[in-house]
Amino acid sequence: MVGIKKFAAGLKLRLSLKKYQPAEIRIPYDMQNTRNILVCLPPGQRELTVVKQVLPDLSQVFGDAEIYLMASPGSSVHGIFPHKGFRILTPSKDHLTWSGLARRKYLGVLHQNKYDLILDLNLDSSNFVKSVLLSFPRAIRVGSAGNLGAPYYNFEIKSRYLRDEKSIYRSIIEMLGSLKVQMPTKTDSNLN
């Protein structure tokens, strides 16, 4: 049964990819105007504990932005993460299709927040997260290099750390911070 669900999810994602229209992003300009951030949390308790340690760094980089933490479907994170400074989203089984993708109704709820940046902290592939990422073509979708790649991410960050989750997460956030403070490059179209 699990194999059939994975096959169905893969088929639906491939169909979504055919309809997908990527949007142009301008880095660092778009990062400087970030107002709403969605952080896709990993499913494991150990990983969640590690993410909790680096979230203050993300808050510091994007001080004015509203940060939403989206748990993996069916998991509860209210006991782990502080409510102060973060909005917690916990998708239930009702928010999933039979194959494990996000339902249109749930995607509609997510679209109400108009996310500028989606940060996927899953180091493993998740069909649910893939369906969420594809539904935000105009957002900067950031993830670890070597995980999902394009078109799910339009910005991948490679870390020199291979197995240390805390260092991987911290290096991703540090890279976002260094890009955010860079001044946009202005070019004169007449020079071309």
Image (cartoon, grey):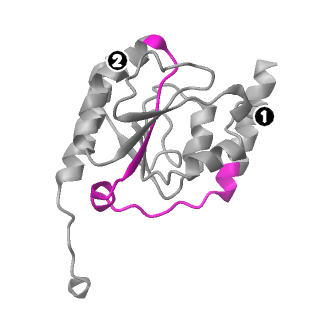
The N terminus lies in quadrant: top right
- Local crowd size for mark 2, using a 10 Å CA cut-off: few (<14), some (14–19), many (≥20): some
x 46%, y 51%: residue: 115
| Mark 2 and mark 1: Cα distance apart in space | 32 Å
The C terminus lies in quadrant: bottom left
> Left or right: 110 with respect to 12?
left
**Element class at badge 1:** helix
Q: Amino acid at mark 1?
A: Ala
Q: Amino acid at mark 2?
A: Val
- Is residue 131 visible from the viewing direction of this image? yes
Start-end of magenta stretch: 16-45
- Local crowd size for mark 1, using a 10 Å CA cut-off: few (<14), some (14–19), many (≥20): some
x 42%, y 11%: residue: 46
Examine the image and state in which quarter residue 32 appears: bottom left
Q: Position of residue 18 (x, y in %)?
A: 68, 55
Examine the image and state in which quarter residue 90 appears: top right
Q: Is residue 21 above or below residue 77?
A: below
Q: Position of residue 85 (x, y in %)?
A: 34, 35
Q: Nearer the viewer, residue 49 or 133?
A: 49
x 17%, y 61%: residue: 183
x 19%, y 45%: residue: 178
Q: Position of residue 121 (x, y in %)?
A: 42, 30
Q: Nearer the viewer, residue 109 or 3?
A: 109
Q: Earlier in the sequence, mark 2 or mark 1?
A: 1
Is residue 148 part of the magenta span, yes or no? no
**Element class at badge 2:** helix
Disc 2 target residue? 50
Q: Position of residue 3 (x, y in %)?
A: 77, 22
Q: Which label sits on residue 63? A: none
Q: Is residue 10 above or below residue 78?
A: below
Disc 1 target residue? 8
